Amino acid sequence: MIAFLKGEIADLTESSVVLDVNGIGYEVLVPGQLLSILGGVGRRVKLYTYMQIREDAAVLFGFLTKDDLQMFRMLTGVSGVGPKAGLNILSCLGADDLRFAILADDAKRIAKTPGIGAKTAQKIILELKDKLDLEEAFEKKLASDHITPEAAAAAGSQVVQEAVEALVALGYGSTEALKVVRSVGPADGMDVEAVLKEALKRMAF
C-alpha cells in the first residue's frame, strides 16, 4: 500500500495530478479544492494517498493532509459511499465543513454534492456522527486556518466554542453558527451570553 507520494507536479487535469516521483509518473485523483492551491507544473508536493484496487485498475486518491485522508476513509467506510463519491463530497465541502455538517445533522448541505442524494446524506450522518467530536472539530478547524493555540486563546476561543455549541443546540447549523460567531469577533470581557445575543441579532437579518 502506498501511504504517500512526494514529488514534482508533471501535469494537471480537471480531476487529477500527475506526480513525478524519481522518474515515475503517478496519476492521483484529488479533490477539486486541492487543484486550485497546488500550484502549477514543476512544484514539489507531498500527497497522502489511498489506493483502490479494482479488477481493471489500481486507482490512487491523494490529499494534502492526513486529516483530509482520514475523513475520506471515514466516508468510504459508509455503506454505499465509494471512493469517487467520497472524493466528490470533499471537493464540494472540504473536511472541516463536512465535519460541521455531520455534527449539525445538515443533510441538505451534504446532499448538494452532485450524485449524493438525501438518503445517502442521511446515512453519512447516521454512521459518522458518533465518530466525531465538536471540540475536536474546532481544534482541526483552527489548525487548518493556521491559528496557533496562543492566538486562539487570545481571541477567546472558549467563548467562541461555547457560543457555537449553544447556537447548534438551538437548531442552527454548525458551519453557519461558527461563521456568525467569528464575525462578532468576541472582544475581551465578552461572555457567552453577550456573544450569543449579538450573533442572534446578525442571524435575524
Image (spheres, rainbow, N blue to C red):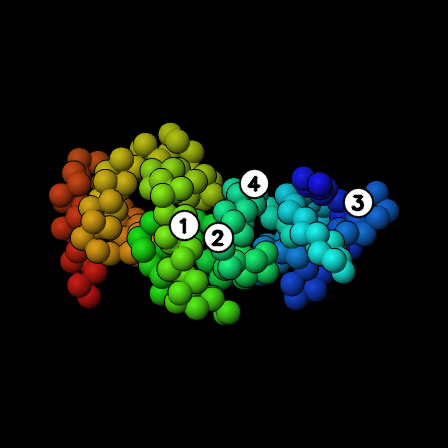
Element at label 1:
helix
Residue type, label 3: Val
State the CA–CA distance, disc 4 to disc 3: 20 Å
Quadrant in the picture for residue 10: bottom right
Q: Where is residue 152 in the image (x, y as percent from the top left)?
A: 35, 35
Q: Is there any visible trace of residue 90 in the rendered image?
A: no
The quadrant of the image that shows the C terminus is bottom left
Does 137 appear above or below 176? above
Q: Seen in the image, is 142 located left or right of residue 154?
A: right
Element at label 4:
helix
Dot in front, 3 or 2? 2
Among numbered discs 1 and 2, the one appearing first in the sequence:
2
State the CA–CA distance, disc 4 to disc 1: 21 Å
The quadrant of the image that shows the N terminus is top right
Return the mark for residue 25. none
Question: For mark 4, what is the residue?
Answer: 66
Question: For mark 2, what is the residue?
Answer: 78
State the CA–CA distance, disc 3 to disc 2: 32 Å
Question: For mark 3, what is the residue?
Answer: 21
Dot in front, 4 or 2? 2
Dot in front, 1 or 3? 1
Question: For mark 1, what is the residue?
Answer: 127
Element at label 2:
loop
For the residue pair 37 and 111, the one nearer the viewer reads as 111
Residue type, label 2: Val
State the CA–CA distance, disc 1 to disc 3: 37 Å
